[in-house]
Image (cartoon, rainbow, N blue to C red):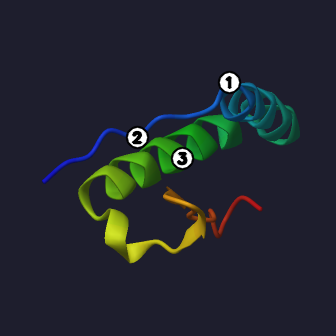
Amino acid sequence: MRLPVRFLPEVEEDVITGYAWYESKSIGLGEDFLRIFYAVAVSLSRNHLLYPKVYGEIRRCLLRRFP
């Protein structure tokens, strides 16, 4: 069963900022960041029980390559 994944506006702002920062370090690195971020979002939707709850029903997955 797929569950919807919702992001707070702050998360969306952080993703945009992260993209710009990584892209400024190396062309294409920002694209890699976005690709991995959205792949994890899909994984959360499909396999949410793999990720620990951090607050109430909120789950978290850290991106290994992009701290």
The residue that disc 2 covers is 5
Q: Residue furthest front?
A: 56
Q: Secondary structure at mark 3?
A: helix
Residue that badge 1 annotates? 9
The Cα atoms of the two marked residues, 3 and 2, are separated by 12 Å
User: Which residue type does callout 3 highlight?
Assistant: Phe
Residue 53, by quadrant, is: bottom right
Q: Is residue 20 above or below residue 5?
A: above
Q: Are marks 2 and 1 in contact (CB under 8 Å)?
A: no
Picture quadrant where residue 23 is located: top right
61, above or below 11, in the image = below
- Which numbered dot is residue 29? none
Q: Quadrant of the N terminus?
A: bottom left
Whether pointer 3 and pointer 2 mark residues with C-beta atoms closer than 8 Å, the reply is: no
Q: Is residue 5 left or right of residue 66?
A: left
The answer to whether 51 is drawn above or below residue 29 in the figure is below
Mark earlier in primary sequence (3, 1): 1
Q: Secondary structure at mark 2?
A: loop
Which numbered disc flags the more N-terminal residue, 3 or 2?
Answer: 2
Front-most of residues 45 and 65? 45
The residue sitting at 34% across, 48% down in the picture is 42
Q: Element under label 1?
A: helix
At label 1, which amino acid type do we have? Answer: Pro
**Which residue lies at the image location 62% right of the left edge and 45% below the top edge?**
33
The alpha-carbon separation of the residues under discs 3 and 1 comes to 15 Å
